Image (cartoon, rainbow, N blue to C red):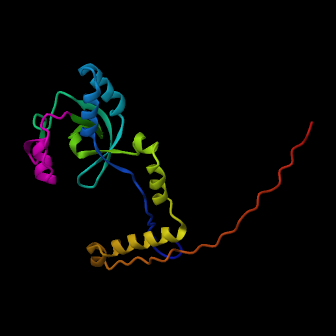
């Protein structure tokens, strides 16, 4: 609540979402490793503790706590709706995502006190890869992300328009005024600092 009634803060964000899946990354590390031991060490160094974006549902972000090389989407089962179901069946039944590599290891992420197992095939690496960070393409990315105030307001108005199209807003007869609240402000000038010499 504010002096003008109930207010909502609407803003736009930019997120770099890689087209490279975790499975692509794991397979690439496997191709470059001398042996199985080196492969697992490379995965520990370059994949574990990375931030990933789930490529289904609400596109949640997770942090990888480990990779289970002894499990795969078919062998790993859990109870869902009082029935034992594999990770592959769950992804297909709930999200319509069909596993293509049944031998891929599973990503472990912390969910409360437990671990949940995700197929790397449907997880995207979060953040800007080093190959892009060092390339001229990074300048293009930053140019898109850095908007001036007029562009920012246009984008926010577009978001408000999308919100107002949602059925729940019409059901509750809620409207959002896209004009921002104007606030009075003043600039406080910095006081001069005087240093005493010894």
- 15 on left or right of 187: left
Q: Nearer the viewer, residue 104 or 168?
A: 104
On the image, the x and y values in percent for residue 85 come to 9, 42
> At 25% across and 20% down in the image, what residue appears?
35
Q: Residue 121's spot in the image, x, y percent?
A: 21, 42
Q: Residue at x 50, y 63 (%)?
A: 147
User: Magenta segment: does it hold 186?
Assistant: no
Residue lying at 76% horizontally and 61% vertically, measured from the top left: 189
Residue 71 is left or right of residue 175, and the answer is left
The answer to whether one can see residue 1 in this image is no
Residue 142 drawn above or below residue 166 = above
- Where is residue 146 shown, x and y percent of the image? 50, 59
Picture quarter containing residue 50?
A: top left
Magenta span has 104? yes
Residue found at x 46% / y 42%: 134
Locate residue 107 relative to residue 83 in the image: left or right: right
Q: Residue furthest left?
A: 83
Looking at the rendered image, the quarter that the C terminus falls into is: top right
Q: Residue furthest front?
A: 136
Number of numbered discs visible in the structure rendering: 0
Asked if 126 appears above or below 57 in the picture, the reply is above
Residue 118 percent across, percent down from the top left? 22, 41
Judge whether 16 appears above or below 154 on screen.
above
Going by the picture, which residue comes out furthest to the right?
198
> Magenta part of the protein: which range?
79-105
Observer able to see residue 99: yes
Front-lying residue, 54 or 176: 54
Vertical placement of residue 37 versus 47, above or below: above
């Amino acid at each position: 609540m504010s002096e003008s009634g109930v207010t909502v803060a609407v803003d736009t964000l930019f997120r770099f979402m890689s087209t490279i899946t975790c499975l692509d990354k794991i397979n690439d590390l496997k191709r470059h490793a001398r042996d199985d031991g080196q492969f697992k060490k490379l995965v520990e160094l370059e994949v574990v503790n990375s931030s990933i974006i789930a490529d289904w549902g609400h596109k949640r972000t997770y942090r990888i706590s480990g990779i289970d090389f002894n499990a795969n989407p078919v062998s790993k089962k859990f109870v869902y709706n009082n029935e034992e179901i594999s990770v592959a069946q769950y992804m297909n039944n709930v999200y319509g995502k069909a596993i293509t590599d049944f031998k891929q290891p599973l990503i472990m992420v912390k969910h409360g006190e437990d671990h949940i197992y995700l197929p790397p095939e449907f997880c995207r690496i979060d953040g800007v890869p080093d190959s892009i960070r060092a390339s001229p393409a990074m300048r293009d990315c930053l140019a898109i992300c850095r908007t001036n105030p007029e562009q920012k307001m246009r984008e926010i108005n577009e978001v408000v328009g999308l919100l107002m199209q949602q059925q729940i807003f019409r059901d509750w007869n809620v409207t959002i005024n896209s004009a921002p609240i104007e606030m009075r402000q003043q600039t406080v000038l910095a006081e001069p600092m005087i240093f005493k010499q010894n």
